[in-house]
Amino acid sequence: MKKIVFILAIICMSSCLAQKKQVKERAGKNAEDKAFPKNYAFPKEYVGTYAGNLNIADASGVLQNIPMELIIKPTEDPKKFSYTLAYIISKKRDERNYTLIVVDPEKGFYDLDENNGVVLRANYMRQTLFSTFEVNNRILNSSVEFKNDGRVFFNIIVTEKGDPRKTGDDKTVVTSYHAIVIQKAALRKVDRD
């Protein structure tokens, strides 16, 4: 086991060194990164309504496919934005009204206030807003990726904490869990009057 951990550590270190070398080589050049062409100011340059379908699935297949909207609006406070998730379930609109709070944009720190006493930490990196939280013995990993062409990719992975697997040795214990549900949506910016 110690040999495996040692080999993994060597591989990780080699990979990190290779990445650092590539970054240094590119630092003096003005080559445009095609995958990440320009960082827009988050969240103000992504204000708008994004619509599409939310696909909810588990290992057996699709459980549900429902229309969804993400609506981001400015408020009077420049550090707060209205952040609404809306779902159409059985022909009824179900809205989750959050407040997106700018905490420290240089560090990518934001809060998602559910406006009911629950405030989730969020981090914005490389055009993606990440949030990880635990509720009712489940861990939820959320990512909302904003594209410059008006598309948004929304993902939530739900993990059950009830049956953890612990492996490793006394020095390195690794706990892993089963992902039980994934929610995915590809949204596109729409014009609303």
Image: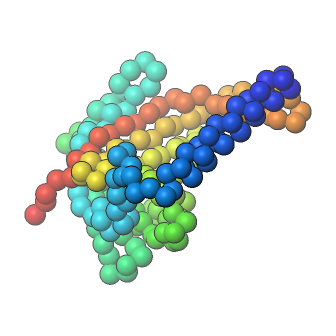
In the foreground, 157 or 26: 26
Front-lying residue, 34 or 133: 34
In the foreground, 24 or 124: 24
For residue 14, above or below residue 168: below
Q: Position of residue 2 (x, y in %)?
A: 86, 26
Residue at 62% across / 40% down in the picture? 18
Q: Which quadrant of the rendered structure holds the N terminus?
A: top right
Q: Please provide percent x and percent y for residue 48.
A: 24, 61
* Quadrant where the image shows the C terminus: bottom left
Q: Is residue 55 left or right of residue 155?
A: left
Q: Is residue 51 left or right of residue 36?
A: left
Q: In this image, 4 relative to 111: left or right?
A: right
- Extreme residue in the bottom direction: 76
Q: Quadrant of residue 54?
A: top left
Residue 116 image position (x, y, % from top left): 47, 65
Q: Which quadrant of the structure image shows residue 81?
A: bottom left
The image quarter in which residue 65 lies: top left
From this viewpoint, is residue 89 visible? no
Q: Is residue 172 visible?
A: yes
Name the residue: 37% across, 45% down: 35
- As displayed, is residue 102 above or below residue 52? below
- Give above or below for 22 relative to 176: below
The percent coordinates of residue 63 (x first, y second) are: 36, 27
Residue at screen point 87% across, 36% down = 171
At horizontal 55% and vertical 45% (from top left) the residue drawn is: 22
